[in-house]
Image (spheres, rainbow, N blue to C red):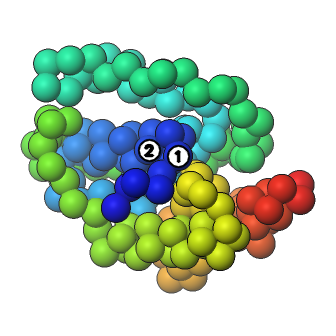
Amino acid sequence: MFEKFSQRAGHVFFLARFKAGQRGAKAIELEDLLVSLVIEDQGKFQEAVSGVWTNGTPVIQPETPPQNPFIAPEIAGELLARFGAPSPQGEPLPTSAEMPLSQASKNALSRANSLCDELQHSSIEPLHLLAAILENQKNKAAQVFRDAGITREKIIPFLKGEQ
């Protein structure tokens, strides 16, 4: 399922799984992915996972090359503040425990894969995921991004290299 993911997209899913586990969720939701996308976009993945252990081993990800964030830092801060700390749903789960994707997250992953293929890209990047999530007009969390001016229509030119 994740074989086409770039390292950065893998970081997004790892962080989403970590955040969902912290609140004891039963599945990785779109909100977990959106928060993780913002954190990764801002180059804060390493900071977010510092101290995380899996199977008794620290999670040490190789540094990714610095990238220019897609989301302006002030908007990123507003988005993260708006999502806040989600209320716990149960006991926190260890990072080694399996956790499924919610149906909405599965749908977003499928759409990201289709977008990647449509654009003839070799790997799924975080912006493919974000564009796919923002296609969902019914999702309230995605609407927060659209209200902040972050739309699929603005992401596609970046993916095409037309910034």
Label 1 sits on residue: 6
Q: Residue at x 31, y 17 (%)?
A: 51
Q: Secondary structure at mark 2?
A: helix
Depth check, front residue: 105 or 141: 105
Which amino acid does the dot numbered 1 rest on? Answer: Ser
Q: Residue at x 36, y 41 (%)?
A: 14
Say which quarter of the image contains residue 91.
top left
Q: Residue at x 55, y 75 (%)?
A: 114
Label 2 sits on residue: 10
- Measured along the vertical axis of the image, is residue 83 above or below residue 112? above
Say which quarter of the image contains residue 103.
bottom left
Q: Position of residue 36 (x, y in %)?
A: 48, 45
Structural distance between the alpha carbons of marks 1 and 2? 6 Å
Residue farthest toward the right in the current orientation of the protein? 162
Quarter of the rendering occupied by the C terminus? bottom right
Say which quarter of the image contains residue 149.
bottom right
